[in-house]
Every structure is written in structure tokens, then in C-alpha cells.
Image (cartoon, coloured by chain):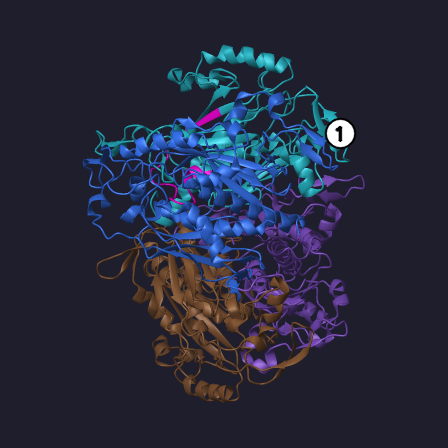
Chain colours: A brown, B purple, C blue, D cyan
Amino acid sequence: MSHNSFGYLFRVTTWGESHGPAIGCVVDGCPPGLRFSEDELQQWLDKRKPGQSRFVTQRREADLVRVLSGAMPQEDGTFISTGTPISLMIENTDQRSKDYSEIARRFRPGHADYTYDVKYGIRDYRGGGRSSARETATRVAAGGLARKVVPGLKVRGALVRIGEHEIDRSRWDWDAIDSNPFFAPDPEIVPVWENYLDDIRKKGSSVGAVIEIVAEGVPAGIGAPVYAKLDQDIASNLMSINAVKGVEIGNGFAAAKITGEANADEMRIGADGKPQFLSNNAGGILGGIATGEPVVARFAVKPTSSILTERRSVDADGNEVDVRTKGRHDPCVGIRAVPIGEAMVACAIADHYLRDRGQTGRLT
Amino acid sequence: MSHNSFGYLFRVTTWGESHGPAIGCVVDGCPPGLRFSEDELQQWLDKRKPGQSRFVTQRREADLVRVLSGAMPQEDGTFISTGTPISLMIENTDQRSKDYSEIARRFRPGHADYTYDVKYGIRDYRGGGRSSARETATRVAAGGLARKVVPGLKVRGALVRIGEHEIDRSRWDWDAIDSNPFFAPDPEIVPVWENYLDDIRKKGSSVGAVIEIVAEGVPAGIGAPVYAKLDQDIASNLMSINAVKGVEIGNGFAAAKITGEANADEMRIGADGKPQFLSNNAGGILGGIATGEPVVARFAVKPTSSILTERRSVDADGNEVDVRTKGRHDPCVGIRAVPIGEAMVACAIADHYLRDRGQTGRLT
Amino acid sequence: MSHNSFGYLFRVTTWGESHGPAIGCVVDGCPPGLRFSEDELQQWLDKRKPGQSRFVTQRREADLVRVLSGAMPQEDGTFISTGTPISLMIENTDQRSKDYSEIARRFRPGHADYTYDVKYGIRDYRGGGRSSARETATRVAAGGLARKVVPGLKVRGALVRIGEHEIDRSRWDWDAIDSNPFFAPDPEIVPVWENYLDDIRKKGSSVGAVIEIVAEGVPAGIGAPVYAKLDQDIASNLMSINAVKGVEIGNGFAAAKITGEANADEMRIGADGKPQFLSNNAGGILGGIATGEPVVARFAVKPTSSILTERRSVDADGNEVDVRTKGRHDPCVGIRAVPIGEAMVACAIADHYLRDRGQTGRLT
Amino acid sequence: MSHNSFGYLFRVTTWGESHGPAIGCVVDGCPPGLRFSEDELQQWLDKRKPGQSRFVTQRREADLVRVLSGAMPQEDGTFISTGTPISLMIENTDQRSKDYSEIARRFRPGHADYTYDVKYGIRDYRGGGRSSARETATRVAAGGLARKVVPGLKVRGALVRIGEHEIDRSRWDWDAIDSNPFFAPDPEIVPVWENYLDDIRKKGSSVGAVIEIVAEGVPAGIGAPVYAKLDQDIASNLMSINAVKGVEIGNGFAAAKITGEANADEMRIGADGKPQFLSNNAGGILGGIATGEPVVARFAVKPTSSILTERRSVDADGNEVDVRTKGRHDPCVGIRAVPIGEAMVACAIADHYLRDRGQTGRLT
């Protein structure tokens, strides 16, 4: 994973800070001939957009994505990709002009302020600069293209835990996802989370979350057995999202607790005469290569460190200070991580699809 | 992460199958002037070597590593790196000549046999081929070099869970690690694990594990805030190890359950006048960049799928078959994953050390 | 060399087509703490800008470069790089709305129209699309940053041949470069070239050129001996410029004609007690590594294929057609290639400077 | 171009020094299912092997290549690639044990001794170490695999100039190549070169050369228009060969001297109803993408700097010394560069073939 890019044949490079004029990304390697529109990309961005409920930051950004290159505009307003780099840009419109002098030299606990300062000796402290979650908007836009690369690919995400409260998986209902502000697949958890988060929010506190991403239509055989593992690249992509502290594939850490008999997915010949798996503990990936079953990944997002309670810290001059975050914040950044996680998984799958096609000539 | 390589400036490319003449790796980008010996590398390999207790596979390999390039032999038998690629080779000596015709076309459940076949259309079925854990020996050798790149770096690992039984962290004792066959940091868990694994082994079963890696002496400031995140690259490296299904940094998935107040590590000025952290929930990494605190990573290893119990499967000809694994196997592959995990973490840190030195000119 | 990027630690990714809304690049890996201004970058762009004399294309673009990320704006209007990706954008302002239907399906001889169509099956035919020399403006902007990475680096270029007329090297005068429309280092060649090119221009013809780039202040020791050769990466960078058909380092192809005695540069200890070279046939690079002498590279640019004379061709429907280029064109694209070549050499040197600093810890 | 590797999907990493135990390479990304044998690879190595005539170095190496991984041995002694990394090794057998103390600290003019020392501070001085042309044997082996990746690809090379004497292109005869010790395509130049080189050799001198590589069967459409240009990657690969000082594609530097009318290759519809070019000044590449015409590249090799005449130099201790090279040497290293150039061009084409297949899905 290099610099500010990810992917190998479907390669995304992102740029931009929270309070600069714009953020954006360059998607290099997108196959030619894909039809898409700014509206389609926008629908994914809108899922991630701040200010949509009281449970996410009230920063208001239009977050309008614009296609600057790599695609021929068509008469109906859509684009067709030409195989050249697709540049996507989102202007920053809600850069409140405020006085940053206070935080310019103070290290907010749990943030990258201190480490950034050590590494670079200079830091764009305005709104978190490059470390702001705002950067993730560009990934969501890139993910909108990635979803088109693999025919039949469907990538969906859901929030499965907020703080102490986990969903009941027996009630899993994909149709519920978009009818609540949490992307919760369990309708009965919604009021629980609402009460819980309202309390967190009113206290100026925050709480962590776990997100699950499920990708269907992943062609069996993509990935690689040792280093360009599909699960490895998915894990890498998800770990690059702000505040993520853990990733697991299939039954993940639970696999550590059980026996080989309980864990290995058995196979039989299906009604269609093709091999089929009788379970999916592997999360759709064996030996780094897709089995054709749904790819299942989960990741843990820590509670945002921007809270109202005063915390002990230091400043760049070596003084001990107490820091508390004023202004807009996310009581649970994990909510908005759902579309981001979807995008990152879609990008990894698109990349491996193209890589496999390159090396083996399958998947035409 | 590309092909069969990992790392960017400290770049490791591995090659080899379980039953070919040899396995090996090329370490490209190792700084010049590092003194090392084959014996030093060997000590790490010996930690991973099969056949050292009844709890690991009885395959017997001398696993002797040989330096083929990139270093000047000195009169005392050591080498000094020259800055050119270091080629390390380990000959395969215990390739039991046996009849593989039975498994050549059968897909072992939980193994990469099926996915490999779908992807490549051809598979080296002898002993798992490229997917064999044998490949990991080369990583351990490369890790031996990585440990030398960063002055003062100390990377250690421990087994913290086998199946249902977890250690008691209050009893953590690094000195206990090497005095039991499990790399257990908790001496009192040892008899528990022995009984438990003896039972597993006798049944021809297997069980998963969790490994924790702790790296001390990681210079604050290495890593990067968005994509070349230190935690991301550690996660990627660990996920590339066979059978790993989950990775977490610091308090990991537990961070999802708590509040921002409980999670964010506060800071004060230490007795030495320098900033210090009052806790290490972050696992030594904030915003993708090292804080200077110990880097803490954990990963989950699934139970090996090679078990004596018959499992339902299919073969390459579309027949339903029942498969059980005869011969040598690891009741808990997680044990030998400890030195592998150490090596992969060391490589990620060495790589980021050189990258940071390149970009910022710090860390001379 | 991957996709639409070049460089390894100083990595430039470009995007954009001739007639889209904008072109731009992302410079990733730029060290933090470098002070620069848009005006400084603009001065390099202005050297390349069309419409400055009757000998280059009359397309009129303001070509104003804008910094979108990766740098903190200072009160005096300058920027300081922060170590994050620097996004540079240049809006396309002179996109004459014209009817492209005629050339949309015709392949202009000597252009990439046909090959593009074969590869991608779709092509942005408006003004050459991605293959337009317009893309090179972004390289020149990136080169402006590269020049700042290496302390003391000075990269200059000159036109040494137009068509049949070569300069007299004995009259080489760097001070003459900017006082004629050709970047000619030989004042006496200027009237010769003016007459020659006026004739070419009036005929609607075009002619090739040779450019020489000289980089002073290149630290001895940067580069690498086998694959990341400094001369190799310079050659690669120069060959990526549109219309370039050949590259040479030092005495280049002339070295093929002479003996080892005549070619190898001898050394002596200089007055400063340090090794010095008595000649520079090597062009400042031995075994892929800089000697400390000026790095000298030359490249040949073919005559642009946009000419008024009708040429035989075919169209996408399999018809034989005759094509001639109407409208604005460059009688000698080699002229504007001078600042582009400078930029590409500067980028290669900046990249190797950072790479060497990373691997060896020298060059702090 | 990174480190000691080249190629993107067909990626070659080489290792080894002149006087270590072995040299070798890892070919990563080779498609599965390719049948090859060590004998086939050996035939290419034998073309490059020293000691085959009085015009090349008398160092005698068996240069036997061995396949260590990535391929299943078949009953008939051949291998079939499995898609995993192919490790190729050549043992060094003729390492004359001699006293290197004299050259250990002296910088041979024209060699990389001085630059190596500046960069790394340590140098394997034995026989040139990593900078020895011996490393190129591994490229030739890798090229043997590359030739198999693209169906119908035929890559041939010829020597077109030795010092002052160039071939007559009107007498070009590919059948003559293998019947003279120079890979000369012009039988009548052979006695001229013999006399000329005998004279050079007896004087202990050396002379440069120009090699031309022609690749037929390159599928139209491979390459890319801006940075992953096919000609750029060919140039990069050729420039990475020891002693190469210049590269050109098609009519190369000659294109700088002519007009657009003379240079651009016109097109017509051929008897087969397909577009065809009426000339090939472009050398088979337009805008970085293959036209389907033969790809033509030339490169200049400088005279080896190992000559009997004393040359002025310095040593690592700051003393002025006179150096002359004793022992075996190549009067014209350009001769053995022919199979190396072929291999490097074949590797670039194989890489782009796979890349194009990946991005566009063509070329199944």
C-alpha cells in the first residue's frame, strides 16, 4: 500500500484536506466503456453525507461530486469511461471561518495531532486537515465506479453494533437498512440505539461501532494465495478508514475459539451440478481466493475522540493543557462508516477482478 | 500489496512451494552496512520450525537458511549488507515421496484447493503447494533482517488464546514465553492448554488461536495519516499469513463497545520533559502514525482444516466425495504463527522507518 | 512505470484531457516544509505555454495553476508543503466549441487515434483527448515542486537541433536561452532557425527537434546500480513525453562509435582534496548512480503529425480516407518540449534523492 | 521502476553478484498453464554465454539455469507454470579465487566503483559485484518465459554497429544472424568486424556498439497513451542494461531531422480488409500503444571501461592512482547485449499484454 493510493490495476489516489478548496481522487485503471452518471455517484455520497440525522455531525456540505476527466459526456447527461484516469472532485463549501489558533498547537487526545506533528513538523490543523473523515467522501465516489467494474457485483453494509448494543442476527433484514438512520438490519434495535445515542449525544460523549459489509456476486477465483490475498487487501482497505481498529473476515476472531470440524465449510454438488458450500464460515474467501460465496467482512470503529469532556493533554510547546472539543461532532462516526466500508470493499474486489483477468485471461 | 511481495522500501518477495526443491525470498531495499549472520536468522527460523513439540506438525525440516546475495562475507563468518537485494534460500529436505493422486483432484474443505483450481486451472497439490504454511519460513528469515533496520526495535509475540482458553493478562510475563511450547506469557495457562490440546490432537481435531505482537522501540512519527497507515500495513501483513481471519490494533474490537472518554489516551509531560501517554488503548498508533508507545497487534488464526474426521466435499470431476486428512498435521497452527507474526510486524515497521526517512529526512 | 503515475517516493499522477473542464496532477510524497508559491510554479508553466511566438501553436490558454491541497497557505500568499498529497489543477479555458464529427471516426496518420481505438474501443477525439500535449502542463507544474526537493539542484534545458539545423556547441551560452523563442543556447543559430521554421510553418508542415537537459547540483550517489538506475528513470520519464522517439545520456549514441580509452572519464584529486572527473562523457551517471558531475540527457522529438498536406488514412468504418489537419498547430513541438523535459528530469532526480535518503540515511 | 524489479503484472526481480554463490530472479505474475523446459530457457542463455568466441570475455560459466518454483514438473521433463512465482537460479561456478585487495579500494574509471562507494559506503568489489554484467543472465532467463506469454510473439535482435562500422541495411538477412559470432544481419560486415575487433582486442582496447531489436506479433492496442507507454517501458528496460547510453524507437533520433510529411506513417485498407500501415517510421508504436507493425528499438552500448591501457583515477583513501584492467574482458560488450536486449523487450511486451488484458478484457 503506497502513499495516498490503493489498488493495483484499479488504483485510487486521493487528495485534499478538510478546509482546503476541495477534495478529490483520481481513479486510474477503470476499464473503458462503463456508463455512469454524477447522479449515480452522488447517491452513494449522500448515504455518507453529514447532517442527515441528529446522530451524525451537523457539518453541512453539499458534497457534490464532479467528473473532471476520463469519461466522454453523453447527450443524456451520463458519461462513458474512456480508460484514462477519472478525476473526481468535491468542493469544500462549509469551511466555517473560525479561529483555529487555540487548537493549532494543542494535541487533541485520541487524534493524530501529536503524531502528525512529530512526523511532518507541520500540520494543517484546520478541521483535522488531511486526517479529517472528510477525505472518505472521495473513497465513496471511487467506490461508485468500482461497483460497475464487476458485472453482477452487489456490495451492501450494515451497522451491527453501537457501543454496548448489538443487533440480533436472526432478525437480519436487508430491506430495513435504508429505513432507519443507522443502516441497521434489525428494525427492533433501532429504538434501543436511538435512546442510547441520544444519551451519548447529550452528554457530548461518543461511542464506537461495528460495521459488516457483504459482497454478493464476487466471481470465484479472484484473489491470490499468498500476498495479493483478497481478504488481505479488503482488510488493508478497511483499516485505512479513519478510526478503524480491527477487521475480520467470515467468522473472524470467533474462528479462534472453535475446532476444525466446526469451522471448515463442507461442499456438495448443487442442483445446478456445480460445487456449492454448505456454510460460509470462511466469509467467501479460502486461501486468499474468492469461493463464490458472499464475501463477509466486519470492522470496528473506535468512538470519536472529539468529546465535550475535558481531557488531559499537552501542547506543541511542552505545556500540559486540558482539551475539550467544541462545536459539531459525530456521537458515533461508525454510522457514516457504512457507505465508506462498502466502497473500500468494492474497490478491492474490482481491483482483483482486473488483476485476475490480466494474469489468467479468465473473466472476459 | 502486489503479487508475491510486500513492503515498499523494505520489500520482500517470496517464492517456493511445499514440495519443490527450495523456498526463498528476496529482500530488496535493506540498508547497507548492517551486520548479520546466518545463525542469527536461523534462531528465528528455529522458533517456527516444525517438530519441536507434540503440539505442532511432525514434519521434520532442517530449515537451514542460506544467504545467496546482497551481503559481503566477513572473516568471522558474519555478513555485512551491501544495499543490493539479499536472496535467502531454504532447501526443502523432507519431501516424502508419496502418492498424491488421491488428493490431486479432491478439494479439501477449508483449504484453498477449490479456489486455486478455479483461479489457475492448475495446482501444485503436493503438500499444499504454494499455499502451504511452509512459505512462512521465508518471512521469518526476512523478519530477521527487518529487526536490524530500526535501531532499538524489539518485536515479541505471545499466544493469548487457544480455542476456548484465554490467558489471564494480569499474569503476563515475557520471560515465560520461551519456557513453554506455546509461547504463552501466562505460565498458569500452560497445563490447561497442554491438556486441552492433547485431547484435540488425539481426536485428530484442531483448534484456533489468537496471537499478540508487541513492538517496542518504534520511533514516534513513522507511518502516514491516510493510506500508508502503519496499522493498515501491519494488518495487511498479518492478514497475509495463512489461516488468519482477523486483525486488531490496540484495544481493537473492544473499542467499539466503549465511549470516547474511556478510549482516548490522555497525555502529560513526563519526567524527561517529553510528552507521554497515560494509557495505550490506541496500540501505539494514532491516525496511522506511531505514537512512540509500544505497537500492539493481535490476530486470529482459524483451526487448520486438516483433520482426521471425514468431511463432505467434491472433486474436480464434479463428484461428491468424503475427505479426511491423513498423516502429519498441526493441532493448532496458531502456535507456530507467533514468530511469523513477529516477522511480519517487524517488516512493516522497517519499511515505514525507511519511508519516513526518505520523505522527511528524519531518523538518520 | 505504472498507469498514469511516475516516480516512487516523489510520485506524480496526472489526469485530464484536452477538452475536458480541467487537467491536473497529484504530487504524492513531497517532503513537508517546502515553501513555494503559485507564481513560482506559474513561471515554469509560462515557458511551456502556447501562443508565445509564431513558432508554436496559437491555442491560447491562460494555463493558470492552482494549489488545491497538501500545503498550508501563508500570510504572504505562499504555501508550505505539509507532506500530504499536493493537488494541482489547471482549468481548460480555450475549448473552442467546434464540430468534431469529422475526425471522430478518422484516424490521423502519426497520431494515436488508431491505436487508441483498438485498445479502448472508445476515444475522446476532442482535441486529442488524453493524448494531447496539453497533459504536459501538469508535468511542468509538478516539476516546479521537484526542483525544490533537492537543495542546490538546477535543471536547465536547451534546443540543440531543429530539423536539419544543429547548434554549434562551441558557442553554447546559457544566458542566451531566454532571449530567443527557441530556447537556443547558440545565438547565431536563431536567425537560421527563424527562416527555416517560417518556411515550414507557411507550408503547413512540421519538423522534429532535439532537446538537451543539464542538471547541476545532483548529489553524487543517488540512483541505483541495476534497475532503479537514475539514467533509466530519466530515460523513462523523457520517453513518456508525447512525440519523443529517442533518449540518450552523456555522449549517448556517440559512445557506440569510440573506444574505451576515449570514452571512460578519468579521475584526479581536485584542489579541494576531493575526487573529480576530468571529463563527463558519462553524462554524470556511472552504473546508474550519479557521479556529482552535471547530469546530461538529450531526447529527440518527432515532427508533429498535424500538417496541412493531405495524407492517406482510414476511418473506423474501414474506409480509405484522406486526412489533413486544419486549424492551429505547432510547426515544431520540440520547442515547447524544453520546459517539459526539464520538469521530467527534475522529478526523476527528486525521486531518487528521497529514495537514497530512505535506504541509506545519507542526504539529510 | 522500483528497486531491483521491473514490470507490473509480469514482474521480474533479480538478485545476485558476480562472485557470490549464485544469481537468480523471481518471475511473478506469469500466467498459469504455460509449458516450458529448462532446455528452452537454456538456449537463450547460451546465446549470451561468455567464452563462445574470441570476441567476448573468456570467463567460462556453465550458466545452467534451474527452475526452483512456480511450475509443476511433468513426466517428459518439461514444466507447466502454475501462476505462482517462478524462481530461476544460476550457480556461479567460475569464481576464480584471486586477490582483490588491489581493486578493493581503487575506482576503475568508467565503472560504478566510485558511485557505488559514495552511495552505499560498502561495495562487493569482487568481479564487479552487483554491477557485473553477469546479472544480465537472469534477465535472459526471464525473457525466455516472457516470450511464451504472448501467443505468436517473435523477438529477435541484431548488432547493427561496432565502433566505426555500421551494417548496410539493404543487405539485412535474419538468417545470417546465427551464423556469425556478432549476431550480424549483414554477412558482408562480418569480415570487416572481425579484423576491426581483432585489432581492438590485441590492443587491450574496447569499442561500443548499437543493437537493434525487432518484435513481431505484438498485438495492436497494447501499451498506454501517457505513462505506461509501451515505448517508454521498452526504453526503461533497455536503459537498465549495463553500459547502455541511448535508446530509440522506430526512426528515433533521425525523426528529429525530417518533416511531418516524411515521418508520419500513412494507412490504407489491406487486402484482408483491415487497416494497414504503408511504412513503419513509428517503430510499431503510436502514442505509446502498439500499432500491430513490428516494434523496432535500438540501443547504444558504450565500450567497456575494462581496458589494458593505464588510466588516471583515485582510490578510496584520496590518493591519485593509475588503473589498468588485467585479465579477461570483452572487447565489445555490445555483442552479448543482443540476447539481453531481446529479453528485455520481450518482458515489456508480455507485461503490457497482461495489463491490457486486465484493464480492457481484450486479448483473451
Amino acid on which the number 1 mark rests in the picture? Glu
Is residue D222 on the magenta stretch?
Answer: yes
Where residue D120 sits, quadrant-wise, is: top right
Q: Position of residue D172 (x, y in %)?
A: 40, 18
Residue under numbered circle 1: D320
- Picture coordinates of residue D196 (x, y %)? 55, 12
* Chain designation of label 1: D
Give the image location of residue D180, x and y in percent: 49, 15
Which residue is at 72% across, 40% downward?
D122
Disc 1 element: strand
Judge left or right: residue C86 versus residue B14.
Answer: left
Please report the bounds of the magenta region as a residue range.
D211-233
Above or below, comparing residue A163 to residue C95 in the picture: below
* Residue drawn where x is 51% and y is 39% of the image: C175
Residue D353: in magenta span: no
Horizontally, is A351 left or right of B125 in the view? left
Along the viewing direction, whichever of A204 and B153 lies nearer the viewer: A204
